Image: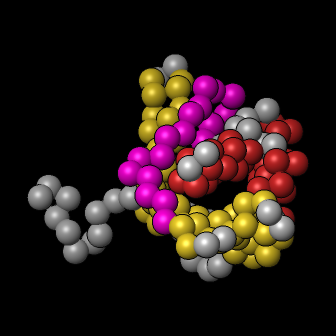
Amino acid sequence: MPLDQEIHEFLLKHLRSVQENDTPTYHETTGADLTLYEWWVTPHRLDGLPFHEFMMEANAKRGTVFGAEGDPAPTRFDLSNLHIQHYGDTAIASYTLLVSTASAQGVKVASHNETRVIVKIDGLWKVVHVHKSPAYFAPHVDPKA
C-alpha cells in the first residue's frame, strides 16, 4: 500500500475513534505524550490523553457522538483539501475538517482547520500533536469580498 494511502487510512481510523467514543482505538492511535491546541476550548496547549478520554467517556454515557448536540443524530466527517507530507517515520496531515450533523431542522455543517503530526513508534503510527484553528475569515478580511 502506498504510504500516503496508509497514512490516510490510519488518520480516518483515528478520527473515527474520537467521533465514536472508541477509547481503546483512540489509545492505539495516539501517543501518550499528545499535545493539542483546540481553539474553541482554550487558548492554551492541552497535554496528554485525559482531555479527550473525559470527553469521549461523557459522550458515550449520554449516548452522543462528537458533533451532535442533545439527542444522538446521524453525524459524519469529511477531510476537505487533505494534504499529507511524510518524512521518514513522521507524517503531517493538514485539512479542513467538515462535521455534518442531521437533525429535524436539517443538516448543519461545522468546520475548522486541522494539522495532525503522526509518528511511527515501534512500527505503529501514532498522532502526537494536533493543532486546530477556526475556518473563518480573519478580522482584517472583509467577509463580503
Query: Considering the image in quadrants, where does the N terminus appear?
Result: top right
113 or 10: nearer the eye? Answer: 10
Q: Nearer the viewer, residue 63 or 81?
A: 81
Whether residue 24 sits left or right of residue 138 in the image: it is right
Count of numbered labels shown in the rendering: 0
Residue 53 percent across, percent down from the top left: 83, 56
Task: Give the farthest residue toward the front.
Answer: 1
Q: In which quarter of the image is residue 35?
A: bottom right
Residue 8 is inside the magenta segment = no
Q: Which residue lies furthest to the bottom in this view?
A: 44
Magenta stretch encompasses residue 76:
yes
Residue 58 appears in the picture as rendered: no
Residue positioned 44% across, 39% down in the render = 109
Q: Position of residue 129 (x, y in %)?
A: 65, 71
Q: In which quarter of the image is the C terminus?
A: bottom left
Residue at the spot x=79%, y=69% of the render? 121
Q: In which quarter of the image is residue 126?
A: bottom right
Colouring mode (rainbow / by chain / secondary structure / one colour): secondary structure
**Towards the viewer: 66 or 118:** 118
Tell which residue pokes out farthest to the top in this image.
Answer: 104
Residue 20 picture location, percent across and down = 74, 38
71 lies left or right of 59 = left
Residue found at x 79% / y 75%:
33
**x, y (%) of residue 57?**
85, 48
At 65% from the left edge and 66% from the top edge, which residue is drawn? 118
Q: Give the range drawn in magenta.
A: 67-85
Decide: is 5 above or below 119: above
Using the rendered image of the protein, determine whether residue 7 is visible from the camera's viewpoint: yes
